[in-house]
Image: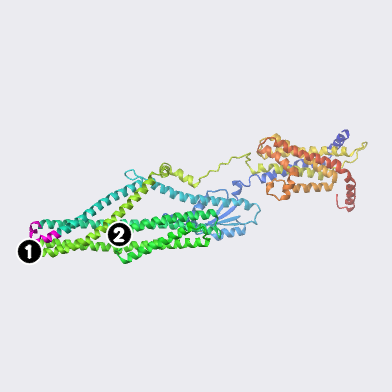
Amino acid sequence: MKNILKIFLTDSGRIFSNVVAMVVIMGLCVLPSLYAWFNIFSNWDPYGQESTSNLQIAVYSEDRGDKIAGEDVNIGSSVLDGLKANKTIGWVFAESKKEAIEGVYSGKYYAALVIPENFTKDMVSFLGGTVEHPAITYYENDKKNAIAPKITAKAKTAVQEQVNASFVSTITDAMVGAGKVITASDSQGDNPLDSGINTLQNMDTELQIYIAVMSSFVNITDAAQGLIDTSQNMLPGVKDTFGQSKQMVKSLETVLNFSVQTEHYAGDMFSLSMDAIRQSLDNIRGGISQDRDTVKAAGDTVDAATQAAIQEAAKRSAGMLSYVNSMFGSTIQNIIGTDPEVDRQIREIQSQLSAVQDNMKKISEKNDLTVEDTNTLLDQSISTMGTIITEIKELEAAYEDTVEPQFDKSMDSAQNALTRAEAALSSMDSDFDMVSPVLDNYENTLKNGKGNLKDSLSTAQGVSAELERIISELNKVRNDDQYKELVKILKEDPDSLGKFISSPVNLETKGIYPIATYGSAMTPFYTVLALWVGALILVAIVHVRVEPIEGMQIRPYQAFFGRYILFFLVGQIQTTITILGDLLYIKIQCSHPFLFWLAGAMTSFTFTLFIYSLTVAFQNIGEALAVVIMVIQVAGAGGTFPIEVLPKAYQVMYRFLPFPYAMNSMRETIGGMYGNDYWDYLLHLSAYIVVALVIGLVLGKPFRSLNRMIDRSKEQAEIML
């Protein structure tokens, strides 16, 4: 022990007696801290807004917009407006697409985003029954910097979030607007559904009155027919009842006029029913189109779940087509036979409806259909449905052009006959022989009118039955608990519903051992690396070999520990300066400053002893080994990238390197302690002290002769130290 101390004191005396040696030692003490501080500063917050906002990315929109519910919408412009408020990236709003792309090629911009001209149209394409996925073109310059593309990738996420926000906001505004319509109240305080039901009920009441009047009118015509027969038999004695007959004719004219008005009302109901049928068919066609897209998206093979879903959808479509076919039959029942062309159109529509219904039944009932067969049936059905909708429009036109004019013609004929009869009765005097032909003509008119009246009565009764069904369905909706809850939400707080739909999930981040800045998180790596570099520079400048001291016989282990004391003290000074600079100058985040210093002191002790032992045992080769070990640890000790993402070789070597244990112990003091992890890391790190002693004291012996031979060879070369 005495010789060890004497060696150390001799070394200290030589340093303090030589100004150059003092300056060198002082430089060795400070240099590692500068290495650590510069690196920590440069990585303080490279991913923060203040830094990334300096990276320029060009943006340009060619979007021409589209109309939604009659309103002009341009999602591309909305995205640009949103990005102007986004300070995460240095957005540059280019004047043209060419300028944006050329800026990326020239290196002026790190990247460019170009929104295409059909962007909004594709975004809302689902409203038309088809889905087009819009795409934003992202141009990226990977040559300019290796890390910049990873940082600017935030731009893609920011734009995607802005597009989603703009799109959802547009749809939400439309939905909330529709909700306001649903919850709006009329002058009586009823919402649209209640008002609609009340209107239909009033319509049904008026229709019942009309049916009653029509029934009475049919009875009146029967009575009039009997009266005409009696009048013809009792013509000689009708002079006394002439005035009564004339009055009856006027009454019949009034009833005919009411019948004309009622028939026009029935025509309006026919058009309403046809519109409802067309709308139902259009909805069914949209559902079949979605099924077709699902099958095509599945490719050549459809899995069992998708096949079951397609069959279930086809079954629902077949049921809905059956109901529409029945509704169509009820609506056109009273116009069959009125015109040959109308009858042909009706038969064609019914035939095509049955064909589509059969296609849906095949898809829903047969499990052995191929994907190609299913696609064929769906395509045929979609095409046929379009034809049916067109033909229904043509049938409505034929009804307006043919059936209604025929009715008007019949009513005009009856009115003219009554007018002539009234004129004849008015001109009669004592010669009643002229009355008989008039009564005959009137009798024929009544027969024709009676048939038309019965048809009108039947149509009115059919419309009444359909109205009662619709009222019943609407009452079910009005009494449904989910509908009531929806109306309640829309009425009380529609804005909250809109906000929920636009962002249904809130992501709450709870930091576990939060570290405020990237620089603080990187401090363990750069501090540990600086301490290794400090120890490496120390052995490169200060000799590890102890020169003989007069009057002393120095043994190898005494020389080893005697010279190492100097290395240890310089290493601890390096650690103290570096740690104090981290805490007080850079002001890193640190929960346990004393333990942070203790981890640094233990790291420096381990590193200086390890590198000193390598140099003592292998001299220049040992220094080279220290450099190689440092390079390996910089690349594969998990200081920057997680060890899990590194090549397999580094993952295997990781647990045998000292860097991870030194860094992890410092991370515990910066982010927060967990159990005894801090002491476990230091315990693992201390294992390298044992390894270092074995290298320096045991392995060094057989290499001494080899080292002397290498030194002589270097001296003979005259160009090496």
Indicate whether residue 105 is drawn in magenta: no
In this rendering, does residue 181 appear at all? yes
In the visual, does 84 lie left or right of 469?
right
Q: Nearer the viewer, residue 557 or 356?
A: 356
Principal secondary structure, stretch drawn in magenta: helix
**Where residue 617 sits: x, y (%)?**
85, 44
Q: Secondary structure at mark 1?
A: loop
- The segment highlighted magenta reads 229-241
In the visual, does 99 lie left or right of 675?
left
Residue under numbered circle 1: 431
Residue reaching furthest bottom?
Answer: 340
Rendering quarter of residue 385:
bottom left
Mark 1 closeness class: few <14, some 14–19, many ≥20 residues within 10 Å:
few
Q: Nearer the viewer, residue 561 or 696?
A: 696
Residue reaching furthest left?
Answer: 430
Residue type for callout 1: Asp
Say which residue appears at 39% left-offset and 55% top-offset: 323
Q: Secondary structure at mark 2?
A: helix
Residue under numbered circle 2: 334
Rendering quarter of residue 394:
bottom left
**Where residue 558 sits: x, y (%)?**
87, 37
In the visual, does 604 lie left or right of 714?
left
Q: Nearer the viewer, residue 162 or 397?
A: 397
**Where residue 126 sits: x, y (%)?**
47, 56
Q: CA distance from mark 2 to mark 1?
A: 44 Å
Indicate whether residue 236 is drawn in magenta: yes
Say which residue appears at 13% left-offset and 59% top-offset: 230
Say which residue appears at 59% left-offset and 46% top-offset: 49
